[in-house]
Image (cartoon, grey):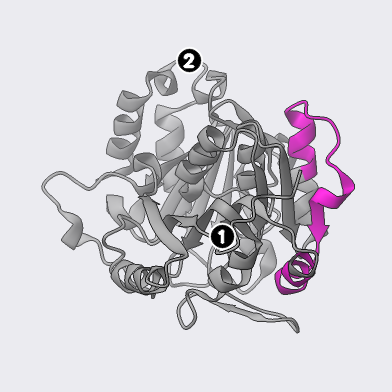
Amino acid sequence: MSIARALAWREAERPTLATPGGHPNDAKSTVFRAFNGFVEGDPSLVLEVFGRCLLIHDHSDNPEGDIAKARAAADEVRARWPWIDVALWKVRRAEEPVLRNGRLLLGERAALPKSVVEEGVSYAVDSMVNRDASFYCDTAALRGWLQRESEGRSVLNAFAYTGSLGVAARAGGAARVVQVDRSAKFLAMARESWTLNGWGEVARNDLIVDDFFAAVGRMKSRSMLFDTIVVDPPFFSQSTAGKVDLVAEPLRMLDKVQPLAAHGAVIALVNNALFLSGAAWMEALRARCEKGYLSIRATIDVDPWSRGRLPEGADRSSIVWPSDPAPFVHPTKMVLLDVRRKDERTSNVR
């Protein structure tokens, strides 16, 4: 599928994209994936829209990227959506942080969006903060679930990054949201998202700048129990306190947070490791559930826009992932687990 066909499909799904003002005038959402080349015909290219900004994620093997292709993509998008007024090119494999974080191909840095809206919720963003642009389109469906299922609940968002999953839970009426991340810079965006949505100041104890392992250890020592726990770690990370390896130890993070889950809690677990198959992960989870304290409530698939639409006549076998994500449709594999505690203790975090 060409970029033009991908954009046309998205226009058909959301007609506001084709209006003179374009997507930024749609008050419900201003952020989405416009082209997923891994599915839609060019694995070296992913395009996302943040407000009036086009983010060009260059996944080519060349660490210097393919600027000619990036410029051509920007021109093709703007020809159909002239409301795009800034384009940022981000080279995934670049050796220089400046190129990974983004180089402007169109417009001025001052025009980059400071926030986006998804399903009526505002999120602070900084598209040049690192190579991932501060907001993941892949987890939109999980944010949607959190908006629907968080009323009155206490929520722990581990590996919070910029806090979007915690923000979605708060938008869904969560009684309390505690977010943990090692980076004060990233959590500052979570704080700004609170302000953008008119929720006032975040409580000092609800944004925890610390290593996951240390923070969870302290919570366990205090016998804190949450109604909902969200675990969306990087596929690999290491600190003096512990290591994350979603391929070699896919359930280690689950083991760490399960003691913090109240009786009747839900753990939303995300594994985005490209080299771990969906079948292997589900097998590991089912084996863990045999102990009787966890059960699989549901799986959540990446939303259709983010995963993209296959070219006409193609099927899933034409997508070459490093490891087959089936039964999931995308390597970002999301599972909801129901928790039973032997002591039946309920949440004590309010």
How busy is the neighbourhood of tag 2: few (under 14 within 10 Å), some, or many (20 plus)? few
Task: Give the residue pinned by disc 2.
Answer: 20
In this rendering, would 16 be left or right of 167? left
State the image coordinates of residue 249 (x, y, percent, origin top left). 49, 80
Identified at 51% across, 33% down, the residue is 148
Task: Give the residue pinned by disc 1.
Answer: 232
- Is-magenta flag for residue 207? yes
Assign the C terminus to one quadrant of the image: top right
Indicate which disc, 1 or 2, sits on the residue closer to the N terminus. 2
Please name which of the two marks, 1 or 2, marks the residue nearer to the observer: 1
Identified at 55% across, 35% down, the residue is 147
State the image coordinates of residue 28 (x, y, percent, origin top left). 54, 23
User: Could you tell me the amino acid type at mark 1?
Assistant: Asp
The part of the image, by quadrant, that contains residue 262 is bottom right
In this rendering, would 178 be left or right of 263? right
Identified at 39% across, 48% down, the residue is 302
Identified at 75% across, 84% down, the residue is 240
Above or below: residue 68 compared with residue 242:
above
As helix, strand or loop, the secondary structure at mark 2 comes to loop
Residue found at the far top of this picture: 20
Q: Is residue 67 visible?
A: no
The part of the image, by quadrant, that contains residue 107 is top right
User: Could you tell me the amino acid type at mark 2?
Assistant: Pro
Q: Which residues are magenta?
A: 191-219
Q: Nearer the viewer, residue 167 or 29?
A: 167
